[in-house]
Image: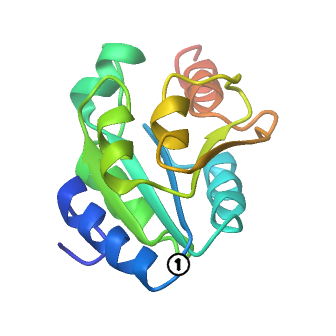
């Protein structure tokens, strides 16, 4: 572990110890490319659902695979450092898998939070519920997205 940043196995071990102490574990995941107010508000709301907020961050390669070959804009190490600097984020780890089911089975959260732009049932829902957890959708913040930030930057700087 390097402060709040570790491997999924390190964090799963810590999560097991914290659960044994009666702590409620919340997980979420995403690219978190170009951290913005929508991310911050979402993560604050996720933290309110329990005691410990653990964030899985897609590796650069996995972001390219599901977003675009032009993404991410911000490298994995920098994205994890930014997230770990937020006081309401307790732990951060990278993951390269196409979906979070493998690491959810290790961490076994009480709550797995996703943004309101997703619809239930989610691919990972069975992995969460199988271990007694629930999936919670947190409403998206209108107009706050990495894509909208990129579009704004392009419109300002590419049309000069």
Q: Position of residue 24 (x, y in %)?
A: 56, 71
Q: Is residue 45 above or below residue 156?
A: below
Taking the view exactly as shown, the residue that stands out farthest to the bottom is: 21
- Residue 46 in the image, given as x and y percentages of width and height: 65, 58
Q: Name the image quarter holding residue 120.
A: top right
Helix or strand or loop: what does disc 1 sit on?
Answer: loop
Residue highlighted by disc 1: 23
Taking the spot 72% from the left edge, 38% from the top edge, the residue there is 144
Nearer to us in this view, 94 or 130: 130
Rate crowding at label 1 as few (under 14), some (14 to 19) or many (20 or more) other CA atoms within 10 Å. Answer: some
Q: Quadrant of residue 143?
A: top right
Image x and y of residue 116, in percent: 74, 34
Which residue sits at x=41%, y=80%?
20
Does residue 14 lie above or below 99 as drawn?
Answer: below
**Quarter of the image where the N terminus is located:** bottom left
Residue at x 19% of width, y 58% of height: 9
**Percent of width and height locating residue 25:** 51, 65
Query: Is residue 107 or residue 48 the one in the foreground?
Result: 107
Number of numbered markers: 1
In this view, the residue in front, 70 or 65, is 65
């Amino acid at each position: 572990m390097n402060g709040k940043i570790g491997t999924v196995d390190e964090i799963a071990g810590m999560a097991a110890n914290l659960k044994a102490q009666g702590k409620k574990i919340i997980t979420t995941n995403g690219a978190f490319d170009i951290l913005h107010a929508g991310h911050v508000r979402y993560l604050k709301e996720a933290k309110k659902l329990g005691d410990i907020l653990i964030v899985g961050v897609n590796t650069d390669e996995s972001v390219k695979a599901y977003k675009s070959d032009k993404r991410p804009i911000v490298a994995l190490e920098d994205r994890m450092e930014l997230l770990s600097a937020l006081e309401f984020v307790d732990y951060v780890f990278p993951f390269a898998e196409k979906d979070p089911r493998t690491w959810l089975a290790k961490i076994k959260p009480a709550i797995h939070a996703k943004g309101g732009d997703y619809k239930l049932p989610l691919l990972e829902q069975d992995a969460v519920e199988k271990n007694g957890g629930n999936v919670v959708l947190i409403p998206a913040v209108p107009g706050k997205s990495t894509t909208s930030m990129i579009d704004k930057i392009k419109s300002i700087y590419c049309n000069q």
